[in-house]
Image (cartoon, rainbow, N blue to C red):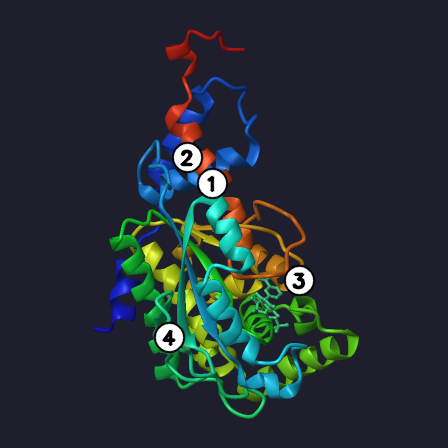
Amino acid sequence: MTLLDDTLSAIVPASAEALAAAEARQLRLTKPAGSLGRLEEIGNRLAAIADACPPPLPARAVIGLFAGDHGVCAQGVSPWPQEVTVQMALNIASGGAAINAIARQVGAEVWVTDVGVAAEVPEHPGIRARNVRRGTRDFTVEPALTRDEARAALEVGIEAANEAIDAGADVLLTGEMGIGNTTPASALIAVFSRLHVTTVTGRGAGADDDMLTRKVRVIDDALTLHRPDPADPLGVLAAVGGLEHAALAGFILGAAARRIPVIIDGVIAASAACVAAGFDESVTGYLIAGHAGVEPGIKAALTWLDLQPLVDLDLRLGEGTGAALALPTVQAAARILSEMATFDSAGVAEG
Ligand SMILES: O=C(O)c1ccc[n+]([C@@H]2O[C@H](COP(=O)([O-])O)[C@@H](O)[C@H]2O)c1
Ligand SMILES: Cc1cc2nc[nH]c2cc1C
């Protein structure tokens, strides 16, 4: 058995009993029924994930941030040069990126992993060196990855989840950095959601009209060339995915196998969540969608996964920023279920 097989066999659906207990408890807390809106739904989801009502407070957060490069950049799908991936990975590892500022604010750790950066990444105490290959192949010409490479990258993500949880993390957040990675993200979302490429493709880190048109054509051509089968998620990843997309899918699977909630970030994370759900649809019960974002693929993917985003700040950065901003809301949802008095205990009359 491989780590991927072991992880998949450990995943069970989130608990329907704990969900029902949390729904019932919400009605006994000192507030009009339903008055905390979607916060109640998040709390109930946390109960189902942990199989406990009230759920434990998700106090120790680790953002698994995976960096990778993309052969498809040769087709002119990003306005940024590929070397920005390694430069930003180093910036994040040194604490100077947006995600570091937000993570400090919300009390989350950022774990940076090189799973597929094209350039040689200098040794850095803040970067976990797990490079599977130096960037994907250009998927307009050949599959981005072999199945073995895709599996290896998935397992890098599973290992990161296990290490974070073993170190005490009780909530995981997804982050990534990779110039060009919105192109494979849209390709993956098109495959799983069965929506047209134009519906799920956006401007990424700043594509103009011409570049957006090219991006759609490039993805369309690749899907025609490879005909990826959504029933074979490893094959889909290999055909049109990315190393960080694979690692993020593994990170999600690893969390679900350990019954730990995962807050997903933007379009890259949403595409990885589609891959993870392609392996086992019960994974969706362990997910919380951090934010709505600007990329159209996010909405398509979240609809496919039956998730609603928590915050909506017109973000289009990635790195895990939207997931990190959602963390305090998720923590508040858990506290509501565990710390509020009931009508009985507080002696408050019921309506
Ligand atoms: O998370 C998102 O929704 C998101 C939306 C647009 C851009 N990004 C980030 O921008 C980079 C990819 O953009 P691009 O245009 O090079 O494909 C990559 O580093 C992502 O982290 C991320
Ligand atoms: C500067 C820069 C920072 C990023 N962070 C995530 N994606 C990014 C893309 C660019 C270009």
The mark that comes first in sequence, 3 or 2, is: 3
How far across and down, in percent of the image, does residue 40 sit? Answer: 49, 33
Q: Amino acid at mark 1?
A: Val
Query: Which residue appears at 57% of the width and 48% of the height?
Result: 309
Q: Quadrant of residue 257?
A: bottom left
Estimate the spatial distance between the alpha carbons at disc 1 and disc 4, rounded to whole Å: 29 Å
Sequence-first tag of 2 and 4: 4
Q: Pick out the residue farthest to the bottom.
A: 141
Distance between the Cα atoms at labels 4 and 3?
26 Å
Within 10 Å of disc 4 (Cα), the crowding (few <14, some 14-19, many 20+) is many
Residue 73 in the image: above or below residue 4 = below
Mark 4 or mark 3, which has the lower sequence index?
4
Name the image quarter holding the N terminus: bottom left
How many numbered circles does the render carry? 4
Residue 57 sits in quarter: top left
Which residue is labeled 1 in the image?
330
Check residue 153 in the rendering and tell me which mark sits there, or answer none.
Answer: 4
Ligand 1 lies under 8 Å from the Cβ of mark 1: no
Q: Are marks 2 and 1 in contact (CB under 8 Å)?
A: yes
Disc sitting over residue 334 in the figure: 2
* Quadrant housing residue 84: bottom right
Name which residue lies at 52% across and 45% down: 326
Query: Is residue 245 in sight in this rendering?
Result: no
Q: What secondary structure is marked by label 1?
A: helix
Residue neighbourhood size for the residue with mark 2, other residues' Cα within 10 Å, grouped as few (<14), some (14–19), many (≥20): many
Q: Amino acid at mark 3?
A: Pro
Residue on which disc 3 sits:
296
Judged left or right of residue 101, residue 124 is left
Above or below 343: residue 80: below
In the foreground, 325 or 272:
325
Q: Disc 3 and disc 2: Cα gap in Å?
A: 30 Å
